[in-house]
Image (cartoon, rainbow, N blue to C red):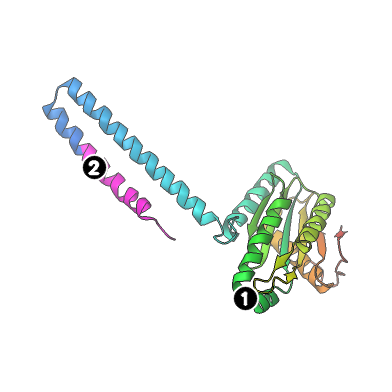
Amino acid sequence: MNFSWTTILVYILIPIEGILIFYAVKGFRCQKSMSEQKEVLDELEERFNHRTMELQKAMNELERINSIDPLTKISNRKSFMVLLKNEITRYARHKRPFTLLIVDMDNFKKVNDEYGHSKGDEVIKKIAKVVAGCARNTDYVGRIGGQEFGILLPETNYDGAAVFAKRLRLDISNTIFYEDKTEIAFSVNGSVGGCVVDGIVEPVLEKIYANADEAVFKSKKFGRNQSTIDMYVEIKSAQEEPLLSDKVNR
């Protein structure tokens, strides 16, 4: 965890100033008139409130920094999982459907090998913008792995999830990149997998994620650049047939 000097100083100065205020008040009560005491106390209170606000701002900024992926400027895995946990809690109260999507870039190692890691980072940043651009104001996106992105879709059933996943996959495929030296154009693809939570009594976060992750595996097994949407299930059958492209498993 990286603390700025401002944050560290605020943490140090607030307790010290509190102690100084305590002894200052104690001394002033012994030496000053009531009106003088009130004037001094008001000034000390104002200073203390100002420092408290600075501390709160510093803590808020620290929390924001710790929740953001530094490369893509979207939520990191930890904060995205908190959002997923919150959505599960909301579902427990209202029983409204939601969907977790995972998109994993296909053969991304090839991009790093052929164009370099700097270009790979550029691709990841641009794909993050594509993913965020597909999302609604009520959706949440995050980078949950090196080349993986999560999309949380509240109020979204299997039909809505299937439409969204297909549009996301196509938007990624239609994004053009250029090699720096030769300016040769290239594109990348992503395999999308999703888990729809609807009609479940007590969905479990780990199982939702596992369902979505398995759906990504199905998409890759059937040729990559596919989207597969599964309904949430407690136990996945080993005999279950993987789905074809852009179809829904009910």
Q: Quadrant of the N terminus?
A: bottom left
Confirm whether the magenta stretch covers residue 246: no
- For the point 69% across and 44% down, the residue is 137
Residue type, mark 2 in image? Ile
**181 versus 21 height, above or below:** below
The residue wearing badge 1 is: 116
Q: Which residues are magenta?
A: 1-22
Quadrant of residue 19 in the image? top left
Residue 224 is marked as none
Would residue 106 be seen by someone viewing this image from the given angle?
yes
Question: Considering depth in this image, is 169 or 144 the residue closer to the camera?
Answer: 169
- For the point 58% across and 59% down, the residue is 76
Helix, strand or loop at disc 1? loop
- For the point 18% across and 38% down, the residue is 23
Relative to 225, 77 lies left or right: left
Residue type, mark 1 in image? Gly
**Around disc 1, counting alpha carbons within 10 Å, would you say few (fewer than 14), some (14 to 19), or many (20 or more)?**
few
Question: Considering depth in this image, is 242 or 47 the residue closer to the camera?
Answer: 47
Distance between the alpha carbons at the discs numbered 1 and 2: 56 Å
Q: Residue furthest bottom?
A: 113
Q: Quadrant of the C terminus?
A: bottom right
Estimate the x, y position of residue 17 in percent, counting from the top left: 26, 42
**41 versus 241 height, above or below:** above
Question: Considering depth in this image, is 42 or 239 the residue closer to the camera?
Answer: 42
Would residue 204 be seen by someone viewing this image from the given angle?
no
Which numbered mark, 1 or 2, is in the foreground of this view? Answer: 1
Estimate the x, y position of residue 154 in percent, counting from the top left: 72, 47
Looking at marks 1 and 2 on the same chain, the residue that comes earlier in the sequence is marked by 2
The residue wearing badge 2 is: 19
